[in-house]
Image (cartoon, rainbow, N blue to C red):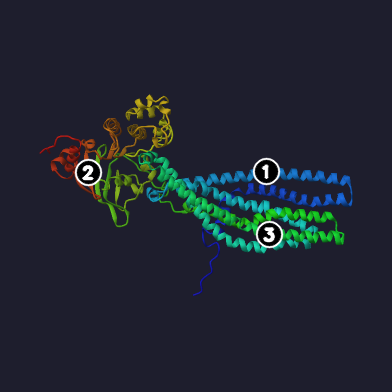
């Protein structure tokens, strides 16, 4: 069977397909502005070509006609031409810069919007530095590709056409000397393109590694210093920077390899033109202005011709970054928009899991046919050893992941049949690792309810036992929390998070070991805040410290993905099973006297 030859556009991320896509999808929408820029480039190119032609006339007026008035007239025309060229260059430069900035901003918005529609699993095996690099270098590469194409077509091609026209007009035969440069240059450049692609990919990866090490070192600076890891992190970043430096040097060498050949061939062509033109002036009596005009046009045409010869090399280096950006934008969203689904309608806020099974990886179930009902307005506590699947239950309730089998039902509505946004708007989540944004305390509380009034924010802070410590700061609610809330203590961050959940006023509350990392005093304050938060709401809480959930309406012991015990505190102690074992172990660790289960 005859194999069908592949077209250069078959690869969706190949150079030809990428260029076509960038032009049609992102460039054409700005075609009126590009048209203005091309018109101004044409003015600039015409002014350049006319200047070369007029310089020959100046020579003839000086040495052949010896006309002072002719020299003055031509000089004034040249002033007008250069002024027009300067104004046109300014105009098209500003227009192209504005187009590039618009395309850059649009691609950054597209990438961020795409990342916001990915589920939690999408990020589990990726580093945030990768997306930062794609957001910056990748988006910038798109504008550089389009900028190169427009500059090549507008500035360089138009200038070259105008100057070649002058050369041909002055001496068609002498113009043939310029053609000897093209074939050898094309052969060399073709060999360099593949090498450029590989080096550009390595540079992108190396830059990501540098950002990764920098980000981890600064965000984990306490750990770095506590474990004296300064030298280790320095060695890591030195290795990454060294690799990027080596690749950059290789890139510089490869990109510059065409220059010696181009310069040599250009010198040969210019020398040939000089000898031929000089011979014509001396031997045949040709006007010196014609020779001078040709030579000026030839020299002016050399730079745009050299840029066009290198265009393929530069394009392929930038296309690597554009591909990295589009790979993310093009990939199917792991959390696609489902706003067309009906909204969750709550009446009582009863939460039920029906035979829910889930696994992060095939063949490794984390939850195994888990079923329970969280009655409206009650607290259900999940306890048990780490890795049993407790946090996964909350993740599934928030639809960070979709259940593998079974269903999660809220007020007789399967949550996979309603929109995620409506589900999450009805749910408030507070975790052990509180994330605060780099903003003021007021802003961080208001994130729970965009548009919250000052009274609502203050009321939430008071209910979360946070108002007093907030007002102790000189700036009060305007106090910046720092990166990840670094300006606040653990207990303060936790109470701000609870205030954020309170201002949301959601009927379903999910708490993931919200006091596990706190000292006793902070825990007492946070527990008081949690009591305000959970009052009258359906609450599901994961507890590490069992004494914090002794009064829960229902306690579920989760082990190895299954519920092995359920009941209230006293009944579970009396049963003398897994819960009683966990509770007594913690009680002994706290230094309390042994407990005797009630009958």
Q: Are marks 2 and 1 in contact (CB under 8 Å)?
A: no
Residue at left offset 32%, top offset 37%:
507
Query: In the rendered view of the protein, which quadrant contains the C terminus?
Result: top left
- Pick out the residue farthest to the bottom: 1
Residue annotated with mark 3:
264
- Between discs 2 and 1, the one toward the N terminus: 1
- Between discs 1 and 3, the one toward the N terminus: 1
Quarter location, residue 494: top left
Tell me the SS state at disc 3.
Answer: helix
In the rendering, at what x and y percent does residue 10 appear?
52, 62
Within-10-Å neighbours for mark 1: few <14, some 14–19, many 20+: some
Residue annotated with mark 1:
91
Position of 493 relative to 370 (above/below):
above
Mark 2 vs mark 1, foreground winner is: 1
Nearer-the-camera pick, 77 or 66: 66
Mark 1 vs mark 3, foreground winner is: 3
In the rendering, at what x and y percent does residue 277 appear?
80, 59
Residue annotated with mark 2:
556
């Amino acid at each position: 069977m005859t194999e069908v030859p592949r077209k250069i556009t078959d690869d969706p991320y190949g150079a030809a397909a990428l260029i076509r896509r960038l032009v049609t999808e992102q460039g054409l929408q700005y075609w009126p502005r590009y048209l203005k820029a091309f018109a101004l480039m044409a003015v600039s190119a015409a002014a350049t070509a006319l200047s070369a032609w007029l310089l020959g006339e100046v020579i003839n007026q000086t040495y052949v006609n010896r006309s002072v008035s002719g020299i003055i007239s031509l000089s004034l025309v040249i002033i007008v031409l250069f002024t027009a060229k300067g104004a046109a260059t300014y105009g098209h430069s500003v227009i192209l810069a504005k187009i590039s900035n618009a395309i850059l901003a649009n691609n950054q918005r597209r990438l961020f919007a795409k990342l916001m529609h990915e589920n939690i699993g999408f990020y589990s095996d990726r580093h945030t530095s990768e997306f930062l690099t794609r957001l910056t270098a990748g988006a910038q590469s798109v504008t550089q590709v389009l900028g190169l194409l427009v500059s090549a077509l507008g500035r360089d091609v138009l200038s070259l056409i105008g100057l070649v026209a002058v050369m041909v007009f002055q001496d068609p035969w002498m113009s043939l000397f310029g053609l000897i440069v093209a074939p050898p240059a094309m052969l060399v450049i073709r060999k360099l393109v593949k090498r450029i692609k590989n080096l550009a990919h390595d540079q992108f990866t190396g830059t990501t590694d540098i950002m990764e090490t920098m980000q981890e070192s600064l965000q984990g600076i306490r750990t770095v210093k506590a474990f004296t890891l300064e030298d280790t992190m320095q060695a890591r970043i030195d290795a990454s920077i060294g690799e990027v430096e080596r690749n950059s040097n290789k890139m510089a060498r490869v990109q510059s390899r065409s220059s010696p050949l181009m310069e040599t061939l250009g010198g040969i062509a210019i020398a040939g033109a000089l000898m031929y033109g000089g011979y014509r002036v001396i031997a045949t009596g040709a006007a010196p202005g014609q020779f001078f005009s040709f030579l000026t046009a030839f020299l002016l045409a050399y730079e745009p011709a050299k840029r066009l010869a290198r265009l393929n090399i530069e394009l392929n280096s930038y296309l690597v970054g554009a591909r990295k950006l589009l790979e993310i934008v093009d990939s199917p969203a792991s959390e696609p928009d489902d706003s067309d689904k009906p909204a969750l309608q709550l009446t009582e806020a009863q939460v039920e899991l029906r035979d829910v099974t889930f696994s992060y990886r095939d063949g490794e179930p984390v939850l195994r046919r888990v079923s329970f009902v969280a009655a409206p307005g009650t607290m259900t506590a999940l306890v048990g050893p780490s890795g049993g699947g407790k946090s996964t239950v909350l993740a599934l309730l928030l639809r960070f992941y979709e259940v593998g089998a079974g269903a999660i039902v809220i007020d007789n509505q399967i949550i996979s049949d309603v929109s995620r946004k409506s589900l999450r708007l009805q749910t408030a989540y507070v975790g052990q690792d509180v994330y605060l944004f780099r903003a003021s305390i007021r802003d961080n509380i208001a994130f729970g309810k965009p548009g919250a009034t000052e009274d609502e924010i203050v009321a939430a802070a008071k209910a979360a036992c946070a108002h007093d410590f907030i007002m102790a700061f000189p700036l009060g609610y305007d106090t910046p929390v720092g990166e990840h809330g670094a300006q606040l203590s653990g207990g303060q961050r936790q109470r701000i998070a609870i205030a954020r959940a309170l201002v949301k006023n959601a009927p379903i509350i999910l708490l993931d070991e919200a006091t596990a990392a706190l000292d006793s005093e902070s825990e007492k304050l946070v527990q008081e805040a949690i009591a305000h938060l959970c009052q009258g709401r359906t609450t599901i809480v994961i507890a590490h410290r069992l004494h914090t959930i002794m009064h829960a309406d229902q306690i579920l012991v989760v082990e190895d993905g299954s519920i092995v015990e359920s009941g209230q505190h006293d009944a579970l102690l009396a049963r003398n099973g897994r819960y009683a074992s966990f509770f007594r172990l913690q009680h002994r660790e706290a230094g309390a006297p042994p407990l005797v289960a009630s009958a």
